[in-house]
Image: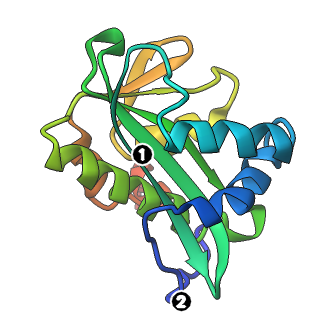
Amino acid sequence: MMKESNKAMIYPRAQRADIPAMAEIRAGDWGTPEYWRERILQYMTHQLHPREALRPRVSYVAVERKRVAGLIAGHLTRRFGCDGELEWISVRPEHRGQGVASELLRRLAKWFVQRDALYICVDVEPSNEVARRFYARHGAEDLKPHWMIWKDIRRALRPPPHPRAERAPEKQ
């Protein structure tokens, strides 16, 4: 069940000063903060190039009371014939279920649309059912075992259906 949305959350573009907090959040899911500090810095400064990535890229953070609560990053690409790729999305556990990830995804989707990049892919572990359900609720479909795709990222700009709204109505 989705918790109440936090009205104090803001969603600016990530800055270099945000990297330590972004790294801490990513390390909560995998790796170490040191690994992620270097990786995020290289990504943001165009020193790290994911396979078939093009130069345009962006990162956003969710910030509440000067504390980074989540992040998203993406870039234009030619991988799998896509126009863009969602590179990372992570939200601190205490902010999950509050719409933070959905708003971060909408920010990235708008960035893609502004660049006429509509066909967007994301690498997602087949066993990560939570992430796969999240992406599917926002319009993504399966592409390959490790990949999902938005045939039109503008679908992610619409509010996702409430999980209960997807159930068949009860017989009366």
Q: Measuring from the top left, give residue 101's x and y in whole percent.
A: 52, 58
Type of the residue with mark 2: Ala
Q: Is residue 159 above or below residue 45?
A: below
Chain-order first, disc 1 or disc 2? 2
Q: Which is more foreground, mark 1 or mark 2?
A: 2
Q: Could you give the CA–CA distance between mark 1 and mark 2, rounded to whole angstroms?
A: 25 Å
User: Which residue is painted at 53% across and 89% down in the image?
Assistant: 8
User: Which residue is painted at 15% across and 50% down in the image?
Assistant: 114
Q: Is residue 129 above or below residue 111?
A: above
Residue 15 located left or right of residue 105:
right
Q: Measuring from the top left, give residue 162's x and y in whole percent.
A: 43, 61
Q: Which residue is mark 1?
A: 137
Q: Is residue 17 above or below residue 33?
A: below
The C terminus, quarter of image: bottom left
Type of the residue with mark 1: Arg
| Observer able to see residue 64 | yes
The N terminus, quarter of image: bottom right
Q: Which residue is mark 2?
A: 8
| Observer able to see residue 160 | no
In terms of depth relative to the viewer, which is nearer, 18 or 2? 18
In terms of depth relative to the viewer, which is nearer, 167 or 161? 161
Q: Secondary structure at mark 2?
A: loop
Residue 38 located left or right of residue 30:
left
Q: Secondary structure at mark 1?
A: helix
